[in-house]
């Protein structure tokens, strides 16, 4: 009986140490290319922080770079009448309904980047009206919410 208990303890201990290692080696389902240390995220520079205001003309599916899993973006018509492509984040993290739709007037904080020869705006926070806000990155350093641990994410969401 003591041998079985020892073997069971060893199996549980190995599982606790090895499973997290295997899980962290590959990106989470639907987040390929969206990793915090990945090529796409390295394009978010705090030095390029800016604000936009305007009306959403269209919600779009985006694949910012070849091989990435799909994300959600929008086309914004800003105060100057220019159309700006805004990247929100991976579809797998945001879900189908992000609380935004065509015609919404929004304020967006984020950073400019050039992707495939096009200037795009990588959002960190989107506000609509007095009561709706969608945060997808930390403004101070660009850390994406989809790369946070459950504890970090809960802390950020509680601070909203």
Image: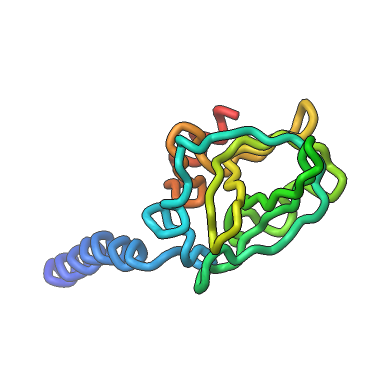
Q: Which residue is drawn at 80% across and 46% down?
A: 56
Of residue 97 and residue 39, the one placed in the foreground of this image is 39
Q: Does the rendering let one see residue 93?
A: no
User: Residue 27: horizontal and vertical position, in percent?
Assistant: 42, 65
User: Residue 125: horizontal and vertical position, in percent?
Assistant: 62, 37
How many marks the image carries: the answer is 0
Compared with 37, 155 (above or below) is above
- In the picture provided, is 80 more to the left or to the right than 126? right
- In the picture provided, is 74 more to the left or to the right than 151? right
State the scheme by which the image is colored: rainbow
Compared with 102, 134 (above or below) is above
User: Residue 69: horizontal and vertical position, in percent?
Assistant: 55, 68
Instruction: Give the farthest residue toward the left.
Output: 3
Instruction: Give the farthest residue toward the right.
Output: 103
| The N terminus: image quadrant | bottom left
Q: Does the rendering let one see residue 70?
A: yes
Q: Answer with the quarter of the image where residue 118 lies.
A: bottom right
User: Residue 115: horizontal and vertical position, in percent?
Assistant: 54, 59
Q: Answer with the quarter of the image where residue 109 lies.
A: top right
Q: Which residue is drawn at 66% across and 40% down?
A: 134
């Amino acid at each position: 009986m003591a041998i079985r208990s020892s073997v069971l303890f060893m199996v549980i201990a190995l599982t606790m140490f090895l499973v997290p290692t295997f899980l962290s080696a590959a990106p989470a389902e639907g987040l390929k290319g969206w990793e915090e240390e990945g090529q796409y995220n390295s394009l978010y520079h705090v030095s390029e922080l800016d604000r936009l205001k305007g009306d959403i003309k269209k919600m779009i599916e985006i694949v910012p770079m070849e091989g990435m899993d799909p994300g959600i973006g929008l086309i914004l018509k800003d105060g100057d009448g220019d159309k700006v492509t805004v990247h929100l984040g991976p579809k797998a993290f945001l879900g189908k309904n992000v609380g935004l739709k065509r015609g919404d007037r929004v304020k967006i904080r984020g950073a400019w980047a050039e992707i495939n020869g096009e200037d795009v705006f990588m959002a960190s926070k989107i506000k609509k009206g007095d009561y709706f806000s969608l945060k997808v990155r930390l403004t101070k350093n660009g850390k994406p919410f989809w790369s946070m641990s459950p504890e970090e994410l809960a802390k950020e969401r509680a601070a909203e």
